[in-house]
Image: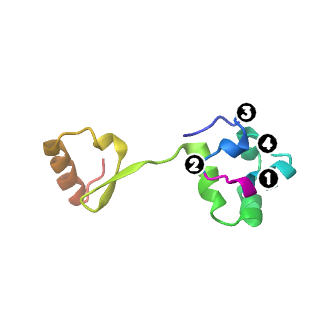
Amino acid sequence: MSYAKNSTVPIELLPGIGTRTAGILKKMEIKTVGDFHQLPVAMLVEIFGPSIKKVYFNTNHGVRRTVPIGGRKFPLWVRPLGSAALKILFVFLLSGKKL
């Protein structure tokens, strides 16, 4: 899910932010997702480590959900496709072409 830059969603509801991280952010006066977006990524990485980058970018651009098919990951929108359409898509992608 992506959030607006001025989102008022409480920081503790953000996927990937646990109670410890939320507590530290609140001490820094970061109480909402909108506040979180105002921080530079480099500063977040310095404080919380490199794993915070994934949380930050997922809130900006949305979580990329995938489904494994034939040993490869595909976006969730391929799941409703019928088996024939999936085979065609799989062969197409194996040939090195891009959608």
- Tell me if 11 is positioned left or right of 68 in this view: right
Work out whether 50 lies above or below 92.
below
Q: Amino acid at mark 1?
A: Gly
The mark closer to the camera, 1 or 4, is 1
Q: Which of the two discs, 4 and 2, sits closer to the camera?
A: 4
Mark sitting on residue 31: 4
Q: Could you tell which of marks 1 and 4 lies nearer the N-terminus?
A: 1
Q: Residues within 10 Å of mark 1 (few under 14, many from 20)?
A: some
Depicted 75 relative to depicted 94: above or below: above
Q: CA distance from mark 4 to mark 2?
A: 18 Å
Mark 4: amino acid? Lys
Mark earlier in primary sequence (4, 3): 3
Q: Position of residue 1 (x, y in %)?
A: 54, 40
Q: What residue is rendered at 79% in x and 53% in y?
A: 23
Secondary structure under badge 1?
helix
SS label for mark 2 = helix
Q: Are marks 2 and 3 in contact (CB under 8 Å)?
A: no
Q: Where residue 91 sits: x, y (%)? A: 17, 55
**Separation of residues labelled 2 and 3 (CA atoms):** 17 Å
Spatial CA distance of label 1 from label 3 is 17 Å
Q: Amino acid at mark 2?
A: Asn
Q: Which residue is mark 2?
A: 58
* Location of residue 41 by image quarter: bottom right
Image mark for residue 8: 3
